[in-house]
C-alpha cells in the first residue's frame, strides 16, 4: 500500500512541471477553438491530466534497477480469466458468518490488489461520460484499450527500454480495469443532473470569445515578444559569426549599441511591418485569432499600428531610462549640471521613492481597469490604444461589430426580401432557413431533448416558429406550439402554407409536437413551467406601438413571469407580491431587468423580441425578455441601441443568404427606386 501512496505523491510533485509544459498549447487551443478559456473546462482538463499521470505512475513504477534486470514472476503471462477468485478462496480465511475474518480478508494482497485494479479506471469512466460525452459501449471499448496499453507496456519492458518484462501481464487486470471504467460511467450518471453540462460551458465560451480578454491579448503579445527576441538573437549571432563584431569594434563602434539596433529592427518588423501586411495581425494575434482595428472596427492603417506599439515601447522604456539616468548621475559633478539634474542628484532618494510610488499607482490602475473591464464585459483600452485610435479585437468580434454597423431600416429589409425573392430565393426558403437557425440556437443551449414551448403569432414571424417547432420535434424534443388560431385561418403567406404542412406532418410522421390553439391561462402556464426553452415567434419587425394586444400580451407575461419569478407555486401568497403581476418590469423605470430565476427556461426571440420596435427600439407593454435574439438578414436600428439590450440579450445575426448578395442589394439603385441607406 505504501508503494501506491508514494507513486501518487510522486505524481503530485511532477504535475506542476507537466502543467507548465501544457499550459501554452492548451491556451492556444482554447482561444482558437472557443475564443475564451472557461475556468470549469480548465479545471476538468487539468484534473484529468493529473489523474492520467497518477494512473501511469501507479502502473509503471517502480522501475527495475537496470535494463537487463529479470523479474521471474513477470516472465510468463497469466492468461486464465478470474484466477484472482481462486486465489481469494484458497488463500483467505474469509467467512461470511464470522465478522472477525472480514478485516483480515481486506488486508490480503489478492483482495486489495483486485480492488485497486477496479478503482484505477473508475475516474476514467467518469471523465469519458461527463467530459467527453461517450456512450456506454464507447466507454467499455476505450477502457479496455487503456488497460491493454498498461499491460502491454509492462509486458514489453516499457516498449523495449528494458530487456525483459518487469510486471506480470494478467488477463484479470484487463477484466477488472475495464469493469472499473464501467462503474465510473454508471456512478457519474446521477451527478450529471446537477453538474454543469460541458456542452453549455463550451457554448458560453464561444459567446464570451467574441470579446478579446486581457489574458488573450497579453498571451499574444508575449508570443510576439518571444519571437522577436529570438529572431533578434539569431540575427545578432549570424552577423557576429560573419565577422561584423570585430570589424565594428575595430572601427571604434559599440557592439552593444548594434545589438540594440537589431532588437529594435526586429520589434518594428514583428509589431508593425507584419500586421501592416497581414490585415492588422501580428504572428501571435494570428495564432489566437485577434486583430488590430480602429475603434469602429474598421481596418487600422500602418501608421496607427506604428503609433500603437511605438507609444507602448516608449511607455515601457522611458520611466526606466529616467530612473537609471538619475542613478547614474555623478554627485561630484553637480555644479556642472542644469537645475533639474542637480535637484535629482541632491534628492536622489526622494526621486526614487516618487518613481516607485508612481509606478505602483500606475500598475494598480492597470489591474483595476482590467478587473472592471472583465466584470462589466467591456474592452480593456490602454493609453497607447486611445492615442492611436486602435484596439485589439477577436476576428469574430470584428465581424460582428462590422455587421452591427451595417444597419438596415425595417422597410429596407422588406424591400431586400422582395428583391431576394425576385433573384430566385422564395420567402418560403428564407422562412425554412430562419426556422433552422432558431432551432440550432435552441439545440446549442439545450443539448439533450427536453420540453420546448414555441409561441407563434399569425404573421410570417410565426411561420419561422412553426418551422423551428417542426425541426425540434424531428430532433426528438417534446415541443409545444402555441398559436392564436388554426393554420387555415392564418392570412400571411408563406406562414399559412408552412403551418398547414406542419399539421399534416405531425400525424403522418408521429412527431412529438403538440399544437395548442388559443389555450387558456392555466394550460399555457403549465406548458411554460415545464419547458427547458421558450421561443418567441409572436410579433416580427413590423410591430410598433405602446401596447401588445391579447392574447399575445398574456403569452409574453406568462413567459416573463416564469423567467423572473420561477415556476407557478414558488413564492406565491399574500406575504409576497409578484413583481411581474404588478407590471414593474413594464413601466421602464429600471435600467436592468430583475435577476433571472435559476431554473428559468432558455429564452430565444425570433428576429426581434415581441413588443420591441425593431425600428425605434421602444419597448411596449409587455415586451418579451430574451437570452438570445436571432435576427435575420441584417441588424435593425432598434436592436443595436443600448437600451434594447435588456430585452434582446445577445443579438446573433443569421444572414440567410450569401453576404455578397446582400451587398449587391444594399448598393442596388434600380431606376425609380430609392437607394438603400446603410447606417454606419
Image (spheres, grey):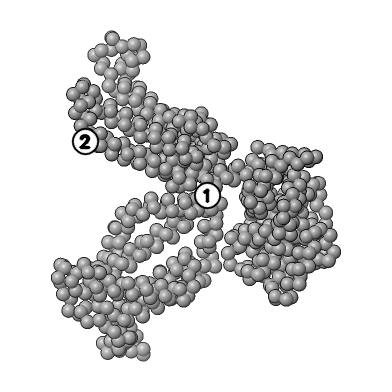
Residue displayed at 51% across by 28% down: 387
Residue 31 at what x, y percent from top left? 46, 50
Give the labeled residue for mark 2. Answer: 241
Residue 656 at what x, y percent from top left? 66, 54
Residue displayed at 25% across by 78% down: 168
In the depicted structure, whether residue 37 falls above or below residue 104: above
**Image quarter of the C terminus:** top right
Q: Dot 2: within a 10 Å radius of its alpha carbon, few (fewer than 14), some, or many (20 or more) residues? A: few
Distance, label 1 to label 2, CA atoms, is 46 Å
Residue 333 at what x, y percent from top left? 25, 12
In the depicted structure, whether residue 638 falls above or below residue 251: below
Residue displayed at 28% across by 9% down: 335
Q: State which tag comes first along the sequence, 1 or 2.
A: 1
The answer to which of 226 and 646 lies nearer the viewer is: 226
Give the labeled residue for mark 1. Answer: 209
Residue 641 at what x, y percent from top left? 68, 41
**Element assignment for label 1:** loop
Question: Can residue 678 be seen by looking at this rendering?
Answer: yes
Question: Can residue 564 be seen by looking at this rendering?
Answer: no
Question: From the viewer's perspective, is the residue at label 1 or at label 2 nearer?
Answer: 2
* Left or right, 616 with reference to 328: right
* Left or right, 644 with reference to 491: left
**Element assignment for label 2:** helix
Residue 146 occupies quadrant: bottom left
In the depicted structure, whether residue 178 falls above or below residue 343: below
The answer to which of 438 and 325 lies nearer the viewer is: 438
The answer to which of 221 and 378 lies nearer the viewer is: 221
Furthest-front residue in this view:
671
In the depicted structure, whether residue 530 falls above or below residue 405: below
Amino acid at each position: 500500500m505504501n508503494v501506491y501512496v508514494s507513486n501518487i505523491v510522486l505524481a503530485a510533485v511532477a504535475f506542476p512541471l507537466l502543467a507548465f509544459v501544457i499550459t501554452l498549447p492548451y491556451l492556444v487551443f482554447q482561444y482558437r477553438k472557443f475564443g475564451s478559456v472557461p475556468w470549469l473546462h480548465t479545471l476538468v482538463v487539468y484534473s484529468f491530466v493529473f489523474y492520467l499521470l497518477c494512473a501511469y505512475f501507479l502502473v509503471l513504477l517502480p522501475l527495475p534497477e537496470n535494463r537487463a534486470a529479470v523479474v521471474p514472476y513477470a516472465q510468463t503471462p497469466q492468461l486464465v480469466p478470474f484466477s484472482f477468485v481462486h486465489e481469494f478462496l484458497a488463500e483467505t480465511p474469509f467467512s461470511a458468518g464470522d465478522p472477525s475474518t472480514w478485516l483480515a480478508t481486506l488486508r490480503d494482497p489478492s483482495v486489495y490488489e483486485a480492488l485497486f485494479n477496479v478503482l484505477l479506471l473508475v475516474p476514467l469512466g467518469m471523465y469519458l461520460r461527463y467530459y467527453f460525452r461517450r456512450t456506454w459501449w464507447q466507454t467499455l471499448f476505450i477502457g479496455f484499450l487503456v488497460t491493454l496499453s498498461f499491460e502491454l507496456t509492462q509486458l514489453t519492458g516499457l516498449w523495449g527500454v528494458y530487456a525483459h518484462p518487469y510486471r506480470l501481464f494478467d488477463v484479470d487486470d484487463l477484466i477488472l480495469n475495464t469493469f472499473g471504467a464501467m462503474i465510473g460511467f454508471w456512478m457519474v450518471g446521477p451527478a450529471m443532473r446537477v453538474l454543469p453540462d460541458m456542452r453549455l460551458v463550451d457554448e458560453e465560451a464561444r459567446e464570451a470569445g467574441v470579446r478579446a480578454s486581457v489574458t488573450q491579448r497579453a498571451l499574444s503579445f508575449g508570443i510576439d515578444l518571444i519571437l522577436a527576441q529570438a529572431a533578434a538573437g539569431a540575427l545578432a549571432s549570424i552577423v557576429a559569426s560573419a565577422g561584423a563584431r570585430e570589424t565594428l569594434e575595430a572601427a571604434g563602434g559599440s557592439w552593444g549599441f548594434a545589438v540594440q539596433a537589431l532588437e529594435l529592427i526586429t520589434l518594428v518588423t514583428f509589431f508593425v511591418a507584419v500586421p501592416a501586411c497581414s490585415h492588422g495581425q501580428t504572428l501571435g494575434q494570428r495564432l489566437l485569432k485577434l486583430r488590430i482595428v480602429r475603434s469602429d472596427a474598421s481596418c487600422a492603417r500602418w501608421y496607427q499600428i506604428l503609433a500603437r506599439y511605438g507609444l507602448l515601447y516608449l511607455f515601457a522604456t522611458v520611466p526606466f531610462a529616467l530612473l537609471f539616468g538619475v542613478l547614474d548621475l555623478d554627485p561630484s559633478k553637480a555644479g556642472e549640471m542644469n537645475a533639474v539634474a542637480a535637484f535629482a542628484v541632491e534628492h536622489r532618494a526622494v526621486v526614487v521613492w516618487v518613481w516607485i510610488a508612481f509606478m505602483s499607482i500606475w500598475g494598480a490602475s492597470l489591474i483595476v481597469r482590467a478587473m472592471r473591464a472583465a466584470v462589466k464585459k467591456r474592452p480593456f483600452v490602454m493609453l497607447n490604444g486611445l492615442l492611436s485610435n486602435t484596439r485589439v479585437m477577436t476576428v469574430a468580434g470584428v465581424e460582428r461589430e462590422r455587421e452591427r454597423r451595417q444597419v438596415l431600416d425595417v422597410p429596407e429589409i422588406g424591400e431586400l426580401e422582395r428583391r431576394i425573392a425576385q433573384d430566385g430565393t422564395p420567402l418560403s426558403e428564407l422562412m425554412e432557413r430562419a426556422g433552422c437557425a432558431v432551432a440550432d440556437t435552441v439545440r446549442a443551449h439545450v443539448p439533450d431533448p427536453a420540453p420546448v414551448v414555441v409561441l407563434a403569432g399569425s404573421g410570417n414571424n410565426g411561420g419561422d416558429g412553426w418551422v423551428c417547432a417542426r425541426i425540434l420535434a424531428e430532433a426528438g424534443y417534446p415541443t409545444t406550439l402555441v398559436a392564436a388560431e388554426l393554420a387555415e385561418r392564418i392570412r400571411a403567406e408563406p406562414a399559412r402554407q408552412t403551418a398547414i404542412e406542419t399539421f399534416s406532418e405531425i400525424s403522418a410522421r408521429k412527431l412529438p409536437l403538440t399544437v395548442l390553439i388559443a389555450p387558456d391561462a392555466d394550460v399555457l402556464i403549465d406548458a411554460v413551467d415545464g419547458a427547458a426553452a421558450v421561443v418567441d415567434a409572436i410579433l416580427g419587425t413590423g410591430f410598433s406601438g405602446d401596447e401588445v394586444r391579447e392574447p399575445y400580451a398574456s403569452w409574453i407575461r406568462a413567459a416573463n413571469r416564469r423567467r423572473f419569478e420561477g415556476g407557478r407555486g414558488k413564492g406565491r401568497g399574500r406575504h409576497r407580491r409578484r413583481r411581474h403581476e404588478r407590471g414593474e418590469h413594464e413601466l421602464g423605470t429600471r435600467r436592468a431587468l430583475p435577476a433571472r430565476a435559476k431554473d428559468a427556461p432558455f429564452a430565444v426571440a425570433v428576429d426581434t423580441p415581441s413588443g420591441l420596435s425593431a425600428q425605434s427600439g421602444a419597448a411596449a407593454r409587455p415586451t418579451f425578455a430574451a437570452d438570445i435574439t436571432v435576427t435575420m438578414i441584417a441588424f435593425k436600428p432598434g436592436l443595436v441601441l443600448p437600451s434594447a439590450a435588456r430585452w434582446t440579450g445577445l443579438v446573433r445575426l443569421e444572414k440567410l443568404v450569401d453576404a455578397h448578395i446582400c451587398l449587391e442589394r444594399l448598393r442596388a439603385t434600380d431606376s425609380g427606386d430609392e437607394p438603400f441607406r446603410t447606417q454606419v
